[in-house]
Image (tube, rainbow, N blue to C red):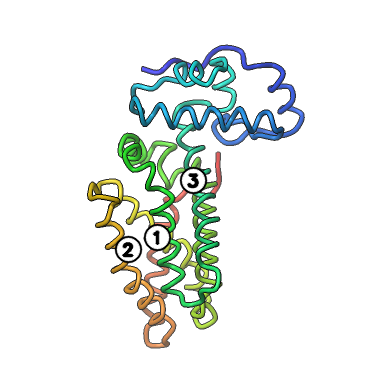
Amino acid sequence: MDEQKGGTPGMDERAQDAVLGAELPGGRARPKTGKSEQTRALILETAMRLFQERGYEKTTMRAIAAEAGISVGNAYYYFASKEFLIQGFYDGMTVEHAVDAARRMQGHTEFADRLFLALSSWLDTAAPYHEFAAQFFRTAADPNSSLSPFANESHRARATAVGLFRDVLTGSDVAPKLDPELRDLLPDLLWLHLMIIVLYWVFDHTPDQERTREFVRRSTPMVAKVVVLSRYRVFRPLVRDVKGLIQDFILPTIGRAAT
């Protein structure tokens, strides 16, 4: 069992950050200085390495702090628990994915191409962490866990991902032709599509997760065709029915803001 939060954080960094900014959800300090950003990054990097070497359950906050060369209290100042270390990893990886996907999509306007590039970018960005991903999946799959992609605490990473899929759509040739209601909802739907891919990816033990990559190659044109067909008047009643179903039963289960 991991230790309870304790100790006194380093007062120099606490005083510095208290003046410059509030905390992130779950007691995670919001980095405002070069030193605090470096300390937070060091804790994250150390934790990810230990999680991969020892496993998530066997790695304690005390071990992370010792390996990083900081006090336990200082580690808890930046991350209220091990769960928030994973949340910090999610946040960082999601931003890395968004930047890489945007770079890949430059010069591409066909919706199917942009969607494929964005999804492939996620697979490449996440590839180094595949073995580690299965270790915390049991916790993330718990709907009451802050690690759940649907949790309030995951709002930052989720908003970044939904924003990326909004760019996938708005930068494409199909965006001006879509029903405005679907155009507003589609980024959330594409994020849910990514969550299905992530679930498949976690359990995919083929070399370089080739089965997941093949799933993306084959499913992306199908998704793109459905999106394109939805702009025709004959499909609009169905589109509105689907939209109502998603808004009434799916979106309300997704945390909209960090607590």
Q: Residue at x 57, y 17 (%)?
A: 70
Q: Residue furthest right?
A: 19
User: How far across and how far down the image is residue 143, in percent?
Assistant: 36, 41
Relative height, residue 37 to residue 121 (above, below): above
Q: Which tag, 1 or 2, sits closer to the chain's start? A: 1
Q: Secondary structure at mark 2?
A: helix
Relative height, residue 222 to residue 196 (above, below): below
Cβ atoms under marks 1 and 2 closer than 8 Å: yes
Q: Which residue is mark 3?
A: 93
Q: Which residue is mark 2?
A: 216
Task: Give the label on residue 120, or none.
Answer: 1
* Lateral position of residue 100 relative to residue 112, left or right: right
User: How far across and how far down the image is residue 254, in percent?
Assistant: 45, 50
Cβ atoms under marks 3 and 2 closer than 8 Å: no
**Mark 2 neighbour density, 10 Å: few (under 14) some (14–19) many (20 or more):** some
Question: Image quadrant of residue 77?
Answer: top right
Q: Secondary structure at mark 3?
A: helix
Q: Secondary structure at mark 1?
A: helix
